Image (cartoon, rainbow, N blue to C red):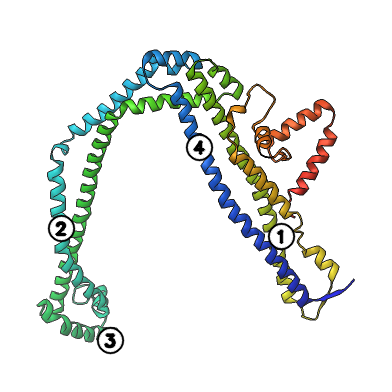
Amino acid sequence: MTDLHASDALLFVESQHQVVNGELQRLRKKEREHAATTATCTQARDATWVMLASILVPSAEAPLLDAVARRLHLPTLASAPAQELFIKRKAYLEQVLAGVDADPRWSRHEALLNACDIHTTEATESLRPLQTSLAQFGNDAAFMELLAVGYGTDGYGTKWWRSSYYRHWKNADEVMERWSATMNAPTFARLRELYEQQRDAAATLQASVRELTQEKQTLQSLVARRNETVQALAALPVWWLETLRVLVIEHLRSLSDADRFALLAGTDATSEAAVLAAKKVSALEAKVRYLEQAREHWIDGPLAELQRTAAKLAKGEAKFRRKNARASFQSDEIRAKYGVHTGKWNDRWHRYDSSCHAIVVFDRYDLYDPYADLLWWDLMARESDERLRGNFLEEVELRDQQLADRDGTAHLLDAGRDQDLVLGDAS
């Protein structure tokens, strides 16, 4: 057993902190890349749902809607309620359009907008010299003080025996020297009056600009609402069809795979295309689900653990910086407390990369049998590397537990699970 001086212990802890920080950077980078991959899969999943709904509902013809409604057990898709949806939407839009057209401002909106621009320009041009003059007054500290104390008015209450009285008197003389000729003000009272006139005129013009700006925004909102309503009426058939497809997506999404495929099964071309699209969407749902759980297992977990380790090492660094450089510590204890075990990191990254690669590249959607005791993960692993274990996935864990309970091998499963958790650990 050897001793370490505080300075040597500090160097050791700092080196371990650098190792941890490097792994943290790697994890954070992978976290961003993983989020982008998951987002891509999510977009593909959503697009495939739309494709499936488009196969089933290529148009809004009444016979087709009735047939699909019966097939999917979705009465809200039948032609009668679907037509009612269309009629209600059309009536609402027409009511909005009629309300805009009845607004007296609509028939004159172009002239009103033009008038707003003209009056705003006029007010702004009139305001500019006033703002310049008022800014100059504002920079004259002596004038602003005299203004504040009411100098030159009946409200001025400073007594003649106070020093401030003579200071105000002197400052007033200097202010008049600066402003009298410029403002054509023979007395301070007149200068004050002219300043207040400018201030009040500027406030009036500023209020006018605000009102004109608000009026213009209101008119622009009126025009935008009418334009949007006209466009919505023109696109009403497209909106209707998309809305009907959303009904189909929401309904199918609420079903299990087995129930969904039972509704879609058939020998005609539409059924075959729908089943294939349903398999793809089921796979993409699984991909998104698997990627989220892979992130939790191999990124979120190690990140949290390494952040705790980094905080512990930072405290250790602070401790050894406070110690006398010649203070001694037992080497074995320092290494046991602050040493970072990196041996399993590469194995964790290998498991992560291999598993995520299997998830992302899989595209043999036709292999899926919703009635077989087979998970999407089984197909993904089979197509990539059958040695891959999916016990980071909840459904694989559940399936394995159920099989183990049935076969009486739960104790073996627990041992295997413990081993895999060690291998997936960040430490």
Q: Answer with left or right where residue 423 lies relative to residue 178.
A: right
Residue type at mark 1 is Thr
Q: Secondary structure at mark 1?
A: helix
Disc 4/disc 3 C-alpha distance (Å): 87 Å
Quick one: label 4 or label 3, which is nearer the N terminus? 4
| Quadrant in the picture for residue 416 | top right
Quick one: label 4 or label 2, which is nearer the N terminus? 4
How dense is the environment of label 4, judged by Cα within 10 Å: few (below 14), some, or many (20 and up)?
some
Q: Secondary structure at mark 3?
A: loop
On the image, the x and y values in percent for residue 17 come to 70, 66
Residue highlighted by disc 4: 44
**Is residue 91 or residue 374 the one in the foreground?**
374
Residue at 17 percent across and 83 percent down: it is 178
Which numbered circle lies on residue 121?
Answer: 2
Q: Answer with left or right where residue 189 lies relative to residue 298.
A: left
Residue type at mark 3 is Trp
Residue highlighted by disc 3: 161
Which numbered circle lies on residue 309?
Answer: 1
Question: Closer to the observer: label 3 or label 2?
Answer: 2
Quick one: label 3 or label 1, which is nearer the N terminus? 3
Disc 3/disc 1 C-alpha distance (Å): 74 Å
